[in-house]
Image (cartoon, rainbow, N blue to C red):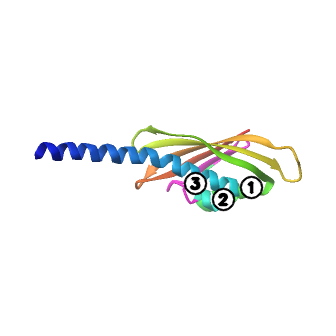
C-alpha cells in the first residue's frame, strides 16, 4: 500500500510540473492576443511585482510600474496599426524562481502608411505566486 502511495505521489508531482510547463504557452498566447488588440492594460496585467523593463526601438527603460509601462506601450500602439500578432515559441528555462520566455511575431504599419513592418517581440517571464509574470519586453525590428 505504501509503495502504491509513493508511486501516486511521484506521478502527481510529475503532472504538476508538466502543468506548469504547459501553462506558459497559454500565458504567451493571452499576451499575444492583447498585443494584437493594442491592449496595453491587458499586457501589463501580467507584470511582475518588481515591474517590467521595456526596450522599444532600442530605447531601454525600466523596470517600470504598471501605469508607466502601459503608457509606453500605449504610445507604441497609438503609432502603429497591427496587421497580425501571432505566438511563436514559449519555453520554460528553469531556475529558482522559475523563468521562461515567449515570442510574438508582430506585423504592423505606422499609422498613415500602407507598408507593413515585421517585428519580433520577446517576453521574459518569471513564476511568482504560482503564476507567470512578465519581467521584460523587447521589440526587435
| Residue interval drawn in magenta | 45-61
Compared with 73, 115 (above or below) is: above
Query: Alpha carbon of mark 1 to alpha carbon of mark 3: how far?
Result: 17 Å
Q: Which residue is mark 2?
A: 40
Please say whether residue 77 is visible from this viewpoint.
yes
Residue at x 27% of width, y 44% of height = 11
Please say whether residue 58 is visible from this viewpoint.
no
Estimate the x, y position of residue 117 in percent, counting from the top left: 79, 41
Indicate yes or no whether the magenta region holds residue 97. Answer: no
Q: Which residue is mark 1?
A: 77
Which element type, helix, strand or loop, lies under badge 3?
helix
Residue at x 82% of width, y 44% of height = 116
Q: Are marks 1 and 2 in contact (CB under 8 Å)?
A: yes
How many residues crowd around disc 1 within 10 Å: few (fewer than 14), some, or many (20 or more)?
many
Q: Is residue 58 left or right of residue 16?
A: right
Q: Is residue 95 left or right of residue 57?
A: left
From the image, which quarter does the C terminus lie in? Answer: top right
Amino acid at each position: 500500500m505504501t509503495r502504491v502511495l509513493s508511486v501516486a505521489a511521484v506521478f502527481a508531482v510529475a503532472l504538476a510540473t508538466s502543468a506548469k510547463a504547459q501553462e506558459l504557452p497559454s500565458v504567451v498566447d493571452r499576451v499575444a492576443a492583447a498585443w494584437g488588440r493594442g491592449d496595453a492594460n491587458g499586457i501589463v496585467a501580467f507584470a511582475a511585482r518588481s515591474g517590467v523593463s521595456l526596450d522599444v526601438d532600442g530605447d531601454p527603460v525600466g523596470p517600470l510600474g504598471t501605469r508607466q509601462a502601459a503608457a509606453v506601450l500605449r504610445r507604441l500602439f497609438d503609432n502603429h496599426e497591427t496587421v497580425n500578432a501571432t505566438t511563436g515559441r514559449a519555453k520554460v528555462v528553469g531556475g529558482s524562481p522559475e523563468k521562461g520566455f515567449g515570442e510574438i511575431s508582430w506585423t504592423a504599419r505606422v499609422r498613415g502608411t500602407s507598408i507593413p513592418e515585421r517585428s519580433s517581440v520577446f517576453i521574459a517571464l518569471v513564476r511568482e505566486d504560482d503564476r507567470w509574470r512578465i519581467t521584460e519586453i523587447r521589440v526587435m525590428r
